[in-house]
Amino acid sequence: MNMSQGLRPVLAITAAVCALIGLYLLAGGVWLTALGGSLYYVVAGIMLLVTAVLLLRRRQEALWVYAALLIGTMVWAVGEVGFDFWALAPRGDVLVPLGIWLLLPPVTRNLGPATRAAQLPLGLSVGAAVVVVGMALTQDPQDIAGALPAVAQDAPAPGDADQMADADWQAYGRTQFGDRFSPLKQITPQNVQDLKVAWVFRTGDLKGPHDPGEITDEVTPIKIRDTVYLCSPHQILFALDAATGKLKWKFDPKISYGPTFQHMTCRGVSYHETKADAQTIDGQPAPTDCAHRVLLPTNDGHLYAIDADSGERCAGFGTNGAVDLTEGMPFKQAGFYEATSPPVVTDKMVIVSGAVMDNYSTREPSGVTRGFDVYTGKLVWAFDPGNPDPNEMPSDTHKFVPNSPNSWIVSSYDPKLNLIYIPMGVQTPDIWGGNRGADSERYASAIVALNADTGKLAWSYQTVHHDLWDMDIPAQPSLVDIRTAGGEIVPALYAPAKTGNIFVLDRRDGKLIVPAPETKVPQGPAPGDHLSPTQPFSELTFRPKQNLTGADMWGGTMFDQLMCRIMFHQLRYEGPFTPPSLQGTLVFPGNLGMFEWGGLAVDPVRQIAVANPIAIPFVSRLIPRGPNNPANPDQSQPSGSETGVQPQFGVPYGVTLNPFLSPLGLPCKKPGWGFMAGIDLKTSKIVWMHRNGTIRDSAPLPIPFKLGVPSLGGPLTTAGGVAFLTSTADYYIRAYDVTTGKQLWQDRLPAGGQSTPMSYAVNGRQFIVTADGGHGSFGTKLGDYVVAYALPETP
């Protein structure tokens, strides 16, 4: 037996591989073509089958056919996605290695004496593929390079500049302007690489057997004088020494909770300090106890006032330091109303909104916002968005309106205008709205400005009409004073929306500063529902410039990419605001939105902002009522999650909500899925944008490929010219040059960092602090860590 005869099994196996791949591509390609997709897979499948037959016949023409396949694939791939390496990868990650194998002696020795001539075109085609890959590695079509302006000479003084000492961080966004900006300058682009862990605190608050899947550690701590205050997922309040991280005291409200709760999270606490001349709303002198108090919201529907110095309850607030937020509610099921975000605090008032169970039924609590006396806890006013008279107070004969649109994230406050700015959600159930009345629609998915003392409406601006996509305002608006080209100082409000739009309004009257023209959107609602013919599209936006196409589908290999393309063409998709359907609708931007609760980080001096937009499509599919989808809850309990089957009892359809993933669990949309970006607020332009984060902690192997991964949380920016972010799907804190977006430094975190970092100083030493406890539904590692970074102390 000669060597060539001995190697024939290798040739047979190679032919079999080509045939199997060809059959898969041909069958899938026929399916895809029938749906209106690309013909490429049919052609590729046929060429692979021809290659297999020629190999079995030991014909050198097999190499010619395969060379033509590779060249055609490269032309098709570049034509679809350009020189975007990660988009090109699944188009060649099977075919190119197979082409290299066909060039090797175990194959070529079995193809006859004239094989060398046939190797040349295949070698050239493999070489061309390598050149394409090399070119793609040197560029990124999704990248925007640029430089933000330095400090403007005519920039106005920040409107919140006099609210606290530079060394402090007294509210969720540092001030209630929500800018997430520290005026500290010790950490700079030149020395940030020297940051080291200064202290670590562990809360001991970990997920237990009775927790829902959506348990998260999203807290941004606050710092006043020498103490840091923060809450953990079960709303345990901690006071730490700001210099060392040592525990001073803790308060455990021992909340009631269970696996059916939709959330188990605490994003932060608020602080109030009694002024020397303070009086309560009814004109009586302010109490002398609890001169410094921390306001703690809880997931079981309570608001606590705790002495910031001792950790004891403020006995004069409500009932022994607590207000029951379920009072006046039409329904009081545990977990259906959750205060997950810190309230607004003024000299007189504490103003509370809360999350309402999404997509469960039409018999749920109200999304009312309420103002309480900050000293006594007495209810002073209410704003119930679903009520014809939103300021109607509860009484023996009146309860708040069921399912009123709610606000689940932090509001902003301008003390000079005495206006609170509330980012509103939509009446639940979210994904079908045929039963909604005009009263429940008028303030849904809007920015609502209220007088902080009375709750009376000043103005409102709606960002989505008849919202059927849960495209609410998910983040605290940022308040910034902008000097226009004409020299006028305009008090602006920046509201990032899930749609990717950033709505820019005059916070005095709600008038648009950046145009957001009403634009026609897809029509054809589900039976019984209706649609708005237009939606506002801001000219300051991160939404995609083009609708998704089959070319945007992705996968780890060409096999799951093909399946993603088939799945894409099976769904209804006509761009943003494609209505929910029984067929299944591709929702992009997805239900997580391009912006989530992290919001923007604004440098009001430089008149710039830093953002971390994400891009993950979702799929929603309406489920008609039937034997497996009853119309009423009966014994049903909430799922404890915002994804999967959502019953929507009381309307004609349930719904399934899930990220758009391949059969292998990878996103079906090509990367990037997460970015860092810089915005010039004076020109309303995106100046730089770069992919952010790696797949190290989400891939089967810990490979740190920088595809750009989604993030939940927000950025911090500093006067030193450095921005920080921790919220990516990989476990890192990263520092960036604010001017260019260049990554300057990173450090490995002990768990997922799905929170927004903050910064403060003690004795001139600047700290960066992050809570790293992970996120249940986001899939990151859970923990109980609070980590502080600082530059090494000088001797």
Image (tube, grey):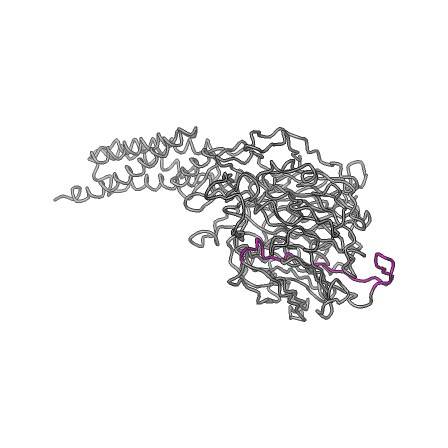
Residue found at x 57% / y 67%: 204
Residue 514 at x, y = what percent? 71, 36
Q: Is residue 745 visible?
A: no
Q: Main secondary structure of the magenta part?
A: loop
Residue found at x 66% / y 60%: 221
Seen from the viewer's position, the closer of residues 576 and 57 is 576
Seen from the viewer's position, the closer of residues 269 and 241 is 269
Residue 286 at x, y = what percent? 84, 63
Residue 362 at x, y = what percent? 60, 44
| Name of the residue lying farthest toward the left | 1
Give, as a single range, the part of the protein colored magenta: 259-286
* Image quarter of the N terminus: top left
Left or right: residue 448 versus residue 47 is right
Q: Is residue 253 above or below residue 497?
A: below
Residue found at x 56% / y 29%: 524
- Residue 266 falls within the magenta-colored stretch: yes
* Image quarter of the C terminus: bottom right
Seen from the viewer's position, the closer of residues 679 and 223 is 223
Quadrant hosting residue 529: top right
- Residue 599 falls within the magenta-colored stretch: no
Quadrant hosting residue 347: bottom right
Q: How many numbered marks does the figure carry?
A: 0
Residue found at x 84% / y 56%: 281
Seen from the viewer's position, the closer of residues 30 and 41 is 30
Q: Is residue 62 visible?
A: yes
Q: Is residue 162 above or below residue 535?
A: below
Q: Is residue 30 above or below residue 632?
A: above
Residue 495 at x, y = what percent? 68, 43
| Name of the residue lying farthest toward the front | 397
Q: Is residue 253 above or below residue 137?
A: below
